[in-house]
């Protein structure tokens, strides 16, 4: 499934899942626009890796909470590539900018989450569509667990913002269907080498242990390369009949019900290895503040 000759723009591709997506698109031959917010050198390193696999691209800075910056991003893309075939809206503002429970969250944090997701996606797609030809591909990276559940209380703003983004995916899918442009959301499960790196080691270990026990049936966290592969599949010509969907790329995690103990469901939560992870003194929510 070659993407040779295709031009792609991946927001938030200086690290994490965005980097994994950029590299997988480049491996298949796409030229990639790489965006960063603060880590310019990291973005330049990604471009170097893109070139090492025989493709090319450019690096630019964007704050997706800033409407004018999104405008400049698409203008830059036009001046670099002329046209755009693939848009991946992946960037997410940093956890401290939006992480507060529903009864405490400040309006400013709510706005940051919403601006970085629903509003950014709205503006990116409106502007990208002006330089996208027949058969384009638009992908929103969401976290559908956060958008459809309510138990991770300090995630309320980002969960709500992702829900708006997923809704927009469906509306844009219809609006762009006659141009053969597909619009889909990809929903990763917890993923290695991502925002996870910014959490305390003990929290990282708890998350790995939890999923290794069977809460992700495949028994491990995903990787940015796993998610990049799924995005590349959706960008292929063969995926042209899939539009308006949220694709779970999570090793089956979204299939597991929390409504009954695993033994009653017919499976046993079992440690991935003999390592026991000590419970930290503070709750997970307090530790990631
Ligand atoms: N990690 C997971 O387990 C997981 C699970 C499900 C869904 N997701 C989704 O996957 C996407 C990527 O997550 P991640 O964990 O890989 O992210 P990450 O490692 O935290 O990286 C965030 C990326 O976004 C950029 N960024 C930060 N603030 C920005 C802003 N205001 N404007 C523009 N760019 C900004 C960063 O640039 P700099 O490097 O320059 O700061 C970086 O490239 C997000 O949409 C997230 O919701 C992640």
Image: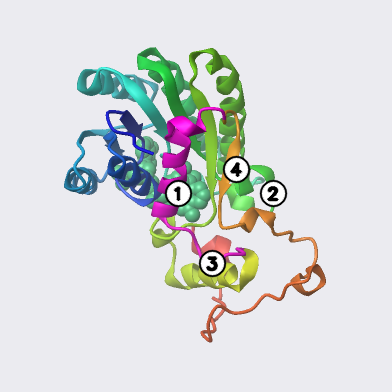
> Which numbered disc, 2 or 3, marks the residue that appears first in the sequence?
2
Residue 6 at least partly seen: yes
Residue at 68% from the left image edge and 55% from the top image edge: 255
Using the image, tell me which numbered label, if any, was put on residue 72.
Answer: none
> Which numbered disc, 2 or 4, marks the residue that appears first in the sequence?
2
> Which numbered disc, 4 or 3, marks the residue that appears first in the sequence?
4
State how many labels appear.
4
Residue count near mark 2 (Cα–Cα under 10 Å), binned few <14, some 14–19, many ≥20: some
Above or below residue 205? Residue 196 is above
Labels 3, 1: front one: 1
Report which quarter residue 120 is drawn in.
Answer: top left
Whether pointer 2 and pointer 4 mark residues with C-beta atoms closer than 8 Å, the reply is: yes
> Which numbered disc, 3 or 1, marks the residue that appears first in the sequence?
3
Is the CB–ligand 1 distance for label 2 below 8 Å? no
Q: Which residue is mark 3?
A: 207
- Look at the numbered disc 2 and give the secondary structure of its residue: loop
Is the CB–ligand 1 distance for label 1 below 8 Å? yes
Labels 2, 1: front one: 1
Above or below residue 7? Residue 282 is below
- Look at the numbered disc 4 and give the secondary structure of its residue: helix
Q: Which residue is mark 1?
A: 227
Q: Which residue is mark 2?
A: 150
Residue count near mark 1 (Cα–Cα under 10 Å), binned few <14, some 14–19, many ≥20: many
Q: Which residues are magenta?
A: 216-241
The image shows residue 37 at horizontal and vertical percentages of: 30, 39
> Which numbered disc, 1 or 4, marks the residue that appears first in the sequence?
4
> Which numbered disc, 2 or 1, marks the residue that appears first in the sequence?
2
Whether pointer 2 and pointer 1 mark residues with C-beta atoms closer than 8 Å, the reply is: no
Distance CA(mark 2)–CA(mark 1): 24 Å
As for residue 227 lying within the magenta part, the answer is yes
């Amino acid at each position: 499934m070659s993407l040779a000759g295709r031009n792609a723009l991946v927001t938030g591709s200086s690290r994490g899942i965005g980097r994994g997506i950029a590299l997988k698109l480049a491996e298949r031959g796409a030229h990639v626009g790489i965006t960063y917010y603060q880590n310019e050198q990291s973005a330049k390193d990604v471009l170097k890796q893109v070139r090492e696999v025989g493709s090319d691209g450019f690096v630019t800075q964007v704050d997706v909470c800033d409407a004018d910056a999104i405008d400049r991003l698409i203008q830059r893309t036009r001046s670099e590539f002329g046209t755009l075939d693939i848009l991946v809206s992946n960037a997410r503002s940093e956890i401290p900018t939006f992480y507060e429970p529903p009864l405490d969250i400040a309006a400013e944090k709510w706005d940051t989450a919403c601006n970085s997701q629903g509003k950014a996606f709205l503006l990116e797609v409106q502007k990208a569509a002006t330089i996208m030809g027949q058969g384009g591909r638009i992908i929103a990276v969401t976290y559908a667990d956060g958008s459809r559940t309510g138990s991770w209380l300090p995630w309320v703003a980002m969960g709500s913002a992702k829900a708006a983004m997923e809704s927009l995916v469906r509306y844009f899918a219809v609006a762009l269907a006659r141009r053969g442009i597909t619009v889909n959301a990809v929903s990763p499960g917890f993923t290695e080498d991502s925002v996870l790196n910014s959490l305390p080691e003990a929290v990282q270990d708890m998350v790995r242990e939890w999923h290794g026990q069977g809460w992700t049936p495949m028994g491990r966290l995903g990787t940015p390369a796993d998610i990049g592969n799924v995005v590349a599949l959706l960008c292929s010509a063969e995926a042209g009949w899939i539009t308006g969907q949220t694709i779970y790329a999570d090793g089956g995690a979204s299939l597991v019900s929390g409504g009954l103990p695993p033994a009653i469901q017919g499976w046993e939560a079992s440690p991935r290895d003999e390592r026991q992870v000590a419970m930290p003194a503070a709750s997970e929510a307090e530790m990631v503040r």
